Amino acid sequence: MSNRGFEKTLSDQERKDLAEKARLCRGDILKMTTLSASGHPGGSMSSIDMYLTVYEFANITPENWDSTKRDRVFVSHGHTSPGVYSALARNGFFDIDDATAYFRLAGSIYEGHIERMVPGVEWSTGNLGQGLSAGCGAAIAGKLRGEDFSIFVFMGDGEQQKGQIPEARRFAVKFGLNNITAFIDYNKLQISGDIADVMPQNIRGEYEADGWHVIEIDGHDFSQIYNAVTAAKKIDKPVLVLANTVMGKDVGFMENIAGYHGKPLTEEQLKEALEELEVENNFADLKEKRAGFQFDESLHVLRPFSSAVKTGTPRTYSAEENTDNRSGFGNALLDVVKETKDASGTPIAVFDCDLAGSVKTGGIEKEYAENFIQSGIQEHHTATCAGAASVNGVISVFADFGVFGVDEAYNQQRLNDINSSNLKVFTTHVGIDVGEDGKTHQCLDYIGAMRNIYGFKVVVPADPNQTDRATRTAIDTDGNWLVAMGRSKVATITDANGKPFFGEGYTFEYGRADLLADGDVALVSCGSMVHRALKVREILAEKGISVAVINMSSPLEPDMEMLKRFADKPVFTYEDHNADTGLGSIIAMKACDEGLNMKVRRFGAESYAYSGKPDDVLKLIGLDPETVAGKIEKEL
């Protein structure tokens, strides 16, 4: 690899070398897809000349792969993985025979869509429309770290139909991300045929309208590709290179045939194609190598993220104070950003979607504007951008309403988790506590949704004091976290002496339940329902029924050891979440897994609720303390 940058003109010898690599790569692409009997050869062959030119001259090598100052290459149309793997292998990142023989083989890192465990791959993609957002995330991280590097984003033309891409385009212009050069593989074909027939677009006009500079080239002319990047570096805007290409380039019977978007060749067709390309046909040897594959789980572990955070001193809200959990979060976040900046720790990027006043990130916007990323009403882009920033040297905080940060951006959060991001999602306005906003905004499924994403920890704190401590812990602990809060003010939870239960001496520990009041029968709750659970206890105490109230703030990891002592009687769960997918269902499943003879009676939302004050809505659907107390009394 030369990696001499994009500062001169391309020499005749460099053009010849690239052309020779491209010839070999096209053979690699066809061998891979035929060997696996699946994959996407057509787009890989139309993109390969661009991949090779950028990987050859950008500041990205097998040796500097761990440097935060390296250039980044994001490939959004991840189905062109054969082209990506071939270009990287031919530039020394790994052995080409390994990538070719093991492509799409169960247990291989060379999966059907590009994955971040492959050296040289920045972001696992294939869910189209997310690559440009990921590139923006890397650019934001670079700005906060004060590092100068180039970002290249490759996309397909059919992919431009995705709505997340305009979000990313506008974001890049707003934040002056002029180190981004994007390429579109403009072969004008997608799965269903001509892009103009499937969904007409004015791709160039749309980018120019959003403030991008557009350069149109022949995407198979190495000099034009190189010169476009050279020119882009001198333009004070994000630049799109619209590269006219040919699907199936250089194999006559494949060229401009939409069917080869996702259809491999037969072995007989492969033989013909390799002869046309004048590439050695070692298919039999690759077949034999594939048969001898040995799975190595360690290759699938992603590069770890290590951060340095100063969490500061927790704040304690007195029993007389009545505030909301979201304010507890906002104040704690402000403390952590201040303390960490003062100690020159890992930069913290706080992403907002036009909700700073509601999600309580306004303090960051006012006092640390450089850390505040206002993305507008663009949740899909923001979720991906924040996730990608978090694997590029910053800690990302994404604050939003539950229905937007979880439900609307679910696919983006799933892909963040696949990429092993270090993202801290703080959602307010969850559950029926949203009240008057009504069923469209009452996020009743945030626990159930995040339960499906393997790497996220979920915390639903009971009051502002626990929220404060959970916030500091989440930001300071590597990995993906969701801290979910309601909207309303809640009473400070106190101990038997009237002191704040989660005050001085309390340390938040993920997965540990809190016994707020002891008794004979367990009532388990979380979030804004905890103070109502305490009210249920009071009502039943007047009737001679002793109820223990347990705060289970980590619903995905319920503290079953605490519950075992109550297993001889029904265990009641109480939440303003979908009764079938929330805390109660998880406890019931865990009890079954552990072979506990425990009856779990779930109180939760059985359907979408109504618009109105939370207490009134809860009463309408039978989740107010009086109704729940009556049902518990009857059950016992």
Image (cartoon, rainbow, N blue to C red):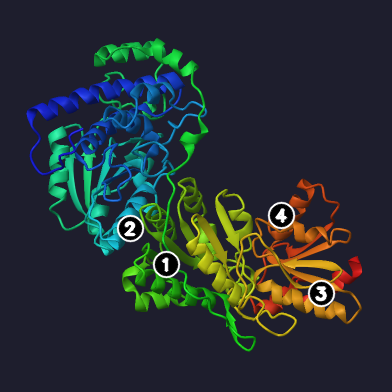
- Camera-side residue of 343 and 487: 343
- Among the 4 quarters of the image, the one containing residue 458: bottom right
SS for dot 4: helix
**Numbered label attached to residue 353:** 1
Q: For the residue carrying disc 1, how many other residues have a C-alpha within 10 Å: few (<14), some (14-19), or many (20+)?
A: many
Q: Where is residue 376 in the image (x, y as percent from the top left)?
A: 38, 67
Q: For the residue carrying disc 2, how many other residues have a C-alpha within 10 Å: few (<14), some (14-19), or many (20+)?
A: many
The reply to whether discs 4 and 1 touch (Cβ–Cβ < 8 Å) is no
SS for dot 3: helix
Q: Position of residue 211 (x, y in %)?
A: 22, 59
Q: For the residue carrying disc 3, how many other residues have a C-alpha within 10 Å: few (<14), some (14-19), or many (20+)?
A: some
Q: Position of residue 416 (x, y in %)?
A: 46, 50
Residue mark closest to the camera, 2 vs 1: 2
Badge 3 amino acid: Thr
Mark 1 or mark 3, earlier in chain: 1
Mark 2 or mark 3, earlier in chain: 2
Residue at mark 3: 627
**Can residue 411 be seen at all in this image of the molecule?**
yes
SS for dot 1: loop
- Spatial separation of the CA atoms under disc 4 and disc 1: 31 Å
Mark 4 or mark 1, earlier in chain: 1
Q: Where is residue 83 in the image (x, y as percent from the top left)?
A: 32, 30
Badge 4 amino acid: Ile
Badge 2 amino acid: Ala
Residue mark closest to the camera, 2 vs 3: 2
Question: What residue is drawn where x is 29% and y is 57%?
Answer: 142
**Numbered label attached to residue 141:** 2
- Among the 4 quarters of the image, the one containing residue 2: top left
**Numbered label attached to residue 586:** 4
Q: Is residue 546 left or right of residue 306?
A: right
**Can residue 170 be seen at all in this image of the molecule?**
no
